[in-house]
Amino acid sequence: MQASAALAPFPSLPSSAGGDARADAWQLLDDPAEWAVFGRQVDAATGRWESHVAVEGMHCAGCAFTVEAALAQVPGVVEVQVNAASRRARVVWSAAATRPSRWFEASARVGYPLLPAGSRSARETRTRELRMALWRWLVAGFCMMQVMMYAYPAYVARPGDMTADAAQLLRWASWVLSLPVVLFSCGPFFRSAWRDLRIGRIGMDLPVTFGVVITFVVSTAATFDPTGPLGHEVYFDSLTMFVFFLLTGRWLEARLRDRTAGALEALMHRLPDGVERLGADGEWTRVAVRRLSAGDVVRVRPGEAFPADGTVIDGDTTADEALLTGESRPVPRPCGDRVLAGSHNLSAVVQVRIASVGEGTRFAQIVRLMENAALDKPRLARLADRIARPFLIAVLACAFGAGALWWSVDPGKALMVAVAVLIVTCPCALSLATPAAMLASAGALARGGVLTSNLQALEALAGVDTVVFDKTGTLTGDTPRLERVYCRQGLRPGDALEIGAALGTLSLHPAARALVNAWQAQFRAPPAWSATQLRETVGQGVAALLQRRDAVDDHDARPVRLGSASFCEVPPLEVDAAQIHLSDADGWIASFVLAEELRPDATQAVAALQAQGLSVRLLSGDRENAARAIGAQAGIAAVQGDCAPEDKLEVLWQLQAAGREVAMVGDGLNDGPSLARANASFAFGHAVPLSRARSDFVVLGDALQAIPAAVAQARRTLRVVRQNLFWAAAYNAVCVPLAVVGWLPPWLAGLGMAASSLLVVLNAARLAAPAKVAKAAVA
């Protein structure tokens, strides 16, 4: 299982835990049996593993750069991706060259301890960090109010109203009250800056730290020596206000980030820690979920999540599958029905026989998509990250230049100007502008039943002007209905259906599944034929050797084909309907006419897309007349039938060559090349194994309205990203000159910096609400 699976509790260590305690905890992860808890093997031949971890103490792009650089230097680490917004990292490493404890230690050495993603300890650490951040904010707020109370008389007093001793006493009181702010509330800034200096990097907390230290030193010097060279003014009020405003922004950012990522984490952490398993002695024993295997029988109580995919063998219940299938209402799951890992049992105690665990479950495939999305860095985010580091160097140079310019006038004023420049230009807002918006949007789409596997695709989807639909399993239902059977003389329709169902079990294509469903509905028993030497031609059909299960001689096997007329080398039926054919060495065996029905919201979804200004087209492998009939029902004028997968790909090439930005919507089976080629792509339908989908978005439910809603959400996302980037640039363009000429005091610079970052995150948080398609589009 992956990071999201139920984990054995990883030792919960506070930040102050000693190196030996951490090292002992890391050594536990060197046991190969633990690797599957927070990762998966990606290449058995080379022993490569992909692990997902949470990163402590990270809040900006500079932190992500530091962690990436530290892990990349560990021998055996092949690839590293770190996302500052989600505070997660993906590490691809070779078991032959390294162990998890080595790269855990490498990250901890630069000040960013790691924890297995999804573990209880990671959640406890995040909660503890939020609680400590709240305490730091409260201390800074209390001290700021007291310091402002002591500073107020100096601002309003006229000459002679206050004695020198009284003024000095107020300064001493302010100095004492500033100590907790500097020594406790500013701790995270100092630690982060020290980490960066120790490894020779410039991080975003370095300007903040310089500003706090310079302000405190200048004010302390003025308190102890009012006539000294650094001036006679104190700035304890500016210092405490700045720290309070900055901590306010940081704390709210952390809360909003947790809320924004809530949909992702709610999905990733749905498996229970343990479940009751039936033992060989007939007794129920509670075991860890990762100890389950196919064939085990487990007991799931109401309110618990199903630990793996399986079949209900005792009891009837209802299940909440909203985050897995997009079905918002409870789904009946009587005895004999299949249940999914991660869905919740709602009604009654049931016994479930496990069918698949770990990577084989639909839950694990969904989680892998969500983890990749949480780690992906969109193009605009990478651009902002590249700009942030040179910008920090320019900030330090600008602050030094401003201080030098003012030094000859007033050394104390010069230092305060430099502090204001350092504070006001910190590029936190620039770094947060894109990832905060993208993650908020991915969370909103996940709640609406659309998984985002590639954050960059949100930007591409916002720019599409053409949407291309596949027909079968996309515009129409997942599985068509068998309507009529034509067969060769001497063969009964039921016998032809049995042969077709035997071959259909080998394929996930909706037409093949239609034959399987028709057989099971009529006979409720597996076909008496077995198939070997399977060969499936994508988009065409299935070929295999078929013989009866009770045959004693393998020489009785005969080659049989199931698929399109051209694949089976038979003439098509002269009917305007979907059809599938069966043939053997003697020629035609049977033809099956299938009835396809539009999804209930297909017409509304197409109208909504057209109302958004998009051109809609239909490409289908079915006959031209059948495709045009479905297109007419859906309101699509541009229809092309008889398309092989290569033909669909060629159409996409032509559209893109003409300057069109194309989104492809398919069922993920024979549309793989087209989904990969499109600018943005949707895999639609329950039958598609998510691990095989080459799409940017996966629609979990049956609602085609998710497509126009996703387009609207993507457009909103790009607007918000542009607003955030514009605000971050405009804020610096206006405030830097004001700080350089001395018109922006440090406290106001701190307020501006905190407000800038907070505004970016709040603006991104608006995307957490799913987009609504315009009423005119769905009327």
Image: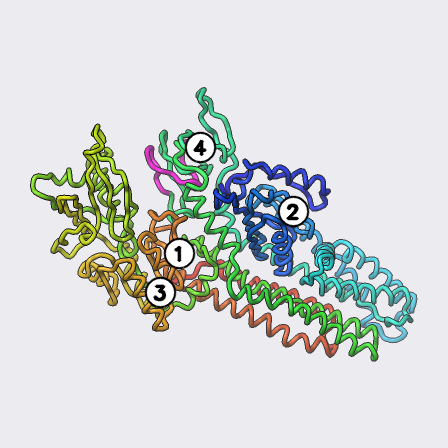
Q: Kindly state the secondary structure of the residue where label 2 is placed.
A: helix
Q: Which mark is residue 28?
A: none
Q: Which residues are magenta?
A: 331-351
Distance CA(mark 1)–CA(mark 2): 38 Å
User: Which comes before the other along the chain, label 1 or label 2?
Assistant: 2
Left or right: residue 199 versus residue 386 is right
Task: Tell me which label, 4 or 1, sits earlier in the chain.
Answer: 4
Q: x%, y% of residue 266? A: 50, 47
Q: Nearer the viewer, residue 519 or 145?
A: 519
Q: Quarter-wise, where is residue 709 in the image?
A: bottom left
Query: Which SS class for mark 3?
Result: helix
Q: Secondary structure at mark 4?
A: loop
Q: Give the quadrant of residue 95.
A: top right
Residue occupied by mark 2 = 128
User: Distance between the Cα atoms at labels 2 and 3?
Assistant: 45 Å
Residue on which disc 3 sits:
775
Q: Earlier in the sequence, mark 2 or mark 4?
A: 2
Q: Callout 1: helix, strand or loop?
A: loop
Question: Which three-letter amino acid code belongs to the residue tagged 2?
Answer: Arg
Disc 1 marks a residue whose amino acid type is Ser
Earlier along the polypeptide chain: callout 1 or callout 3? 1
Between the C-alphas of marks 2 and 4, the distance is 35 Å
The residues bearing labels 1 and 3 have C-alpha atoms spaced at a distance of 28 Å
Q: Of circles 2 and 4, which is in front?
A: 4
Q: Disc 1 designates what residue?
A: 695
The disc label shown at residue 293, or none: 4
Q: Residue furthest top?
A: 281
Circles 2 and 4: CB distance less than 8 Å? Answer: no
